[in-house]
Structure formats: C-alpha cells, structure tokens
Image (cartoon, rainbow, N blue to C red):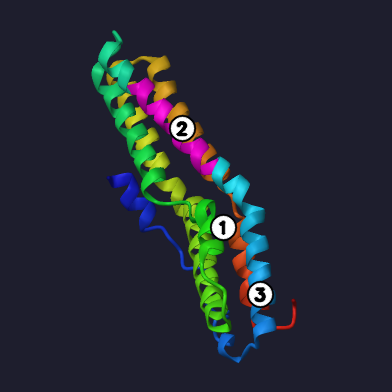
C-alpha cells in the first residue's frame, strides 16, 4: 500500500481564503434556489467525463494487472520483475477504486437530496457545496505534483535495478517506460472541472454572480 499512502499524503487543501458557506443563512429562498440550480448544472456538466475517466481507468488498470499476473505465472521471463509489475498494477487499480472519484457520483446524490421546503433547500445547498469541495479535492489530489513521485520511485527504481540485474533491455523498457507512461496518462488525464467550479463557488456563492 506504499503507493496509495504516498498519494494520499500528497493531498493539498483547496484554498480556503473564501468560505462559500459563510453567508448561506443570510440568503432568501430564491437566492438559495438560484445557487442550487448553478450547482446542479456544474455537477451535470462534469459528470460524463468524470465517469468516463474513473471507470475507464479502473478497466485499464484491471487489464494491466491481469496481464502482468498472467506473465508472472506463465512467462519464461524471470518471475521477480513480472511479480513486481503485477504488484504495481494491482496497487494502482486498488488506489483508483478505493479513492472514489466524487464527481462521478455527485450529480445523482445531489439530486436525491430533499428540497421540498426552504429549510431542506438550504440544507441541500450546504450538502452540494460539501460535495463540490470533496470532488475538487479528489481531482486535485489525483493530478497534483506529488502524484508523480510514486510513479518514478516505483517504475524507475525497480526498472533500473532489473536492468542491472538481468541485462535485458526489453524487460527494462517495459518496466520503466510502460509503468511511467500508463501512470502519467492516469495523472495527466484526470478531470479538473470540479477544481475550477469550486474556485468559482468560493468567489461567487456570497456575491451577486447568479
């Protein structure tokens, strides 16, 4: 679980200079409703890409992990490099699966929240802002600078070790290049819509930008 632990500890707090919940009790019902409509629109706008990325990455890493495990069990190559490769792939799969991509399921959770009274709508607004903040933090975590560190420590470290130990250029290339390319694709393709929307919410929620 080293990779998961390193990535989790790399989370940066999404700036808190402006707290979008500070004025909610001062809003009338029409103002609350306009903000609910804005949140619903932002959740829906980011839903498709968030789901495509999350489910796509789970499928990709499940495939890579299965391939590496098969290589470990059946290949004539040395067992240790393939075992390390399969371990890294399974850790990546567990990491993606265990840390929910909040933006992928936030839209339906937000819409299911009761909103039949002014009090319920205000509670829904607080809930929606909490969902948006968590979605932004998750996306920032997945694409932040420290997300790259475990990739290079794992792939380059083990790849270099095996290139010296086995003197097999194909094995070394697959261990170093394959691991880095797949992991960097995961990091760099992470949706960032929730990060942008949270920044807008921080600046707009207590203003007149609705």
Q: Is residue 5 above or below residue 94?
A: below
> What's the CA distance linking mark 3 and mark 2?
35 Å
User: Relative to 87, is 170 above or below?
Assistant: above
Q: For residue 54: magenta?
A: yes
Q: Main secondary structure of the magenta part?
A: helix
Q: Secondary structure at mark 3?
A: helix
Q: Nearer the viewer, mark 1 or mark 2?
A: 1
The region drawn magenta spans 53-68
**Disc assigned to residue 107:** 1
Q: Residues within 10 Å of mark 3 (few under 14, many from 20)?
A: many
Q: Residue furthest front?
A: 116
Q: Which mark is residue 11?
A: none
Farthest residue, direction top: 76
Quadrant for residue 107, please give it.
Answer: bottom right
Return the residue at label 3: 35
Question: Which of label 3 and label 2 is nearer to you?
Answer: 3
In terms of secondary structure, where does tag 1 sit?
Answer: helix
- Please report whichever mark, 3 or 1, sits nearer to the chain's N-terminal start: 3
Q: Residues within 10 Å of mark 1 (few under 14, many from 20)?
A: many
Query: Foreground: 152 or 141?
Result: 141
User: Can residue 100 be seen in the rendering of this structure?
Assistant: yes
- Check contact, mark 3 vs mark 2: CB within 8 A: no
| Position of residue 146 in the picture relative to residue 76 (left or right) | right
* Quadrant (top left, top right, bottom left, bottom right) of the N terminus: top left
Which residue is depicted at the point 56% across and 89% down?
25
Q: Name the residue rendered at 50%, 43% in the picture.
A: 54
Q: Is residue 168 magenta?
A: no
Percent x, y of residue 10: 40, 57
Q: Which residue is mark 2?
A: 59
In x, y percent, where is residue 135?
51, 60
Give how far across and how far down residue 147 sits, in percent: 45, 50
Label 2, secondary structure: give it.
Answer: helix
């Amino acid at each position: 679980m080293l990779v998961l632990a390193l990535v989790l500890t790399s989370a940066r707090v999404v700036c808190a200079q402006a707290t979008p919940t500070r004025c909610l009790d001062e809003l009338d019902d029409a103002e609350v409703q306009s903000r609910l409509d804005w949140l619903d629109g932002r959740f829906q706008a980011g839903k498709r890409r968030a789901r495509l990325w999350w489910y796509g990455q789970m499928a990709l890493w499940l495939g890579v992990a299965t391939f590496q495990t098969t290589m470990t069990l059946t290949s004539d190559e040395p067992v240790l490099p393939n075992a390390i490769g399969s371990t890294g792939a399974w850790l990546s799969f567990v990491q993606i699966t265990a840390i929910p991509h909040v933006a992928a399921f936030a839209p339906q959770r937000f819409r299911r929240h009761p909103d039949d009274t002014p009090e319920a709508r205000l509670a829904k607004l607080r809930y929606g802002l909490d969902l948006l903040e968590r979605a932004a933090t998750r996306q920032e975590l997945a694409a932040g600078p420290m997300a790259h560190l475990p990739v290079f420590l794992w792939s380059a470290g083990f790849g270099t070790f095996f290139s010296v130990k086995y003197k097999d250029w194909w094995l070394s290339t697959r261990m170093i290049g394959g691991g880095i390319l797949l992991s960097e694709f995961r990091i760099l393709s992470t949706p960032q819509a929730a990060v942008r929307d949270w920044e807008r919410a921080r600046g707009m929620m207590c203003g007149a930008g609705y």
